[in-house]
Image: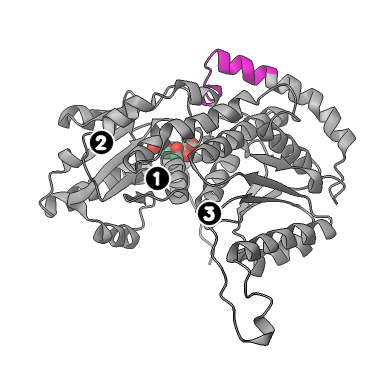
Amino acid sequence: MYVDLGNALGTRPGLDRDTLDRLDERVADAHGTIAAGREAEEHGYAALNLPETTDADAIRSAVSRFENPAAVLTVGIGGSALGAATVANALDSEVDAYFLDNVDPEWVTRKLDALPLDRTVVNVVSRSGTTAETLSNFLVVRDAMESAGVDWTDRTFVTTGEEGNLRELANKHDLPALDVPDGVPGRFSALSTVGLACAAIQGHDLDALLQGGADAMDSLSGSLYDSPGYAYGAVSYALARRGAGVNAMMPYAESLETFAEWFAQLWAESLGKDGVGQTPARALGATDQHSQLQLYRAGPNDKLVTLVRPREYEDRAIPETDLDGLSYLGGKSLGELLDAEFEATEASLKAAAVPNVRIELERVDERNLGELLYAMEAATVLYGELDNVSTFTQPAVEWGKKAARGLLGGGDFEEADAVQDKETLV
Ligand code: PA5
């Protein structure tokens, strides 16, 4: 993985090499805190040890009882779904992956109607085992399986913490269960049982995913210049401090579109605290060159644009044509066109002094994906240290969970009272 910071320097927010060199002293301190947290397996920091603590054999063995599935359905939300979805949507497999995170009833019904329930493996994922969306969706799936005459206990496993409703369910029905590792918040769990069980069912190479993570882990040192993850985290922080309050993540590969969604969750939920944080935006190249790029280049001067692309991919030729006006395309390839679009966007942002960072992967495969996911997690943790926020908590998210449960009678929560107190003005 390569991170090119050249276009982040000398741009309108006014970041230069000297500032980065000075920031590097703070990176060294932050790295010391991170290393100590990892060593002590402290909550959150423990996630940065996953490449060496995740037991790929245990995951493979837990799912091996499900023979020849046509599909795997992950029922989970937020960090309990997005890591698995990022891998599933980046890599090809003969086993289709579906995700039920939202509880929009029409959407859930459409998804269930599309699934071959008798050949689907269901993975119910919730660290807390109490998240209302996940548990409700599971009950709906279970009911659909029963109605279709499918023994759901034969086709279901859970990934959860030591306690909670899901653990109880697994014990009661003797379902296979994978443990969510201690000290790993949902959004940092892509390289654990949470993110990798779906990949194992899809036949992906877990060892390569973890090796990619290990390569990124090994690059962490006390300097931003040694580690792509730290480099990205430090520059994003410095730009945010200078007014780049928005970070537009723009991969130039359809296979990485879900990665932008995963990144948005990681960045927002970890760093949005105490009145600070950088708002992630999601875009896709080249599609969003025809929409959002207008704003990124010419709108408010408050953005960092992160451009991501693989260097190698399976290309496809553009056929020759007898139309004179299109002769420049004949003999070229779609990949060449996409690369030209990428370079054009980068140059156009630079020309308008909008900071942008280029991230390149060798190709989209397990190893490179593991490296990318880990590097972005390290970037997030470093940014959080530099900005002095509590990266691994999510009080606003918990507030919403309690309020929703309280409204449905699932407990006595003051958050629910606050919802009922609402005044309406129409
Ligand atoms: O990152 C987080 O902590 C959250 O996004 C959680 O993953 C999400 O709220 C789901 O929680 P749980 O796994 O407990 O169902």
State whether label 2 is within 8 Å of ligand 1. Answer: no
Magenta segment: does it hold 63?
Answer: no
From the viewer's perspective, is residue 338 above or below residue 393? below
Identify which residue is drawn at 51% across, 60% down.
424
Along the line of sight, which residue is nearer the eye, 85 or 321?
321
Q: Nearer the viewer, mark 1 or mark 2?
A: 2
Amino acid type at circle 1 is Ala
| Residue position for label 2 | 157
Q: Which residue is mark 1?
A: 404
Q: Residue furthest right?
A: 18
Decide whether residue 40 is among the magenta residues: yes
Q: Which secondary structure type mostly characterizes the magenta part of the structure?
A: helix
Q: Residue at x 40, y 35 (%)?
A: 196
Q: For numbered disc 1, what is the local secondary structure?
A: helix
Name the amino acid type tagged 3.
Glu
> Percent position (x, y) of residue 182?
43, 22
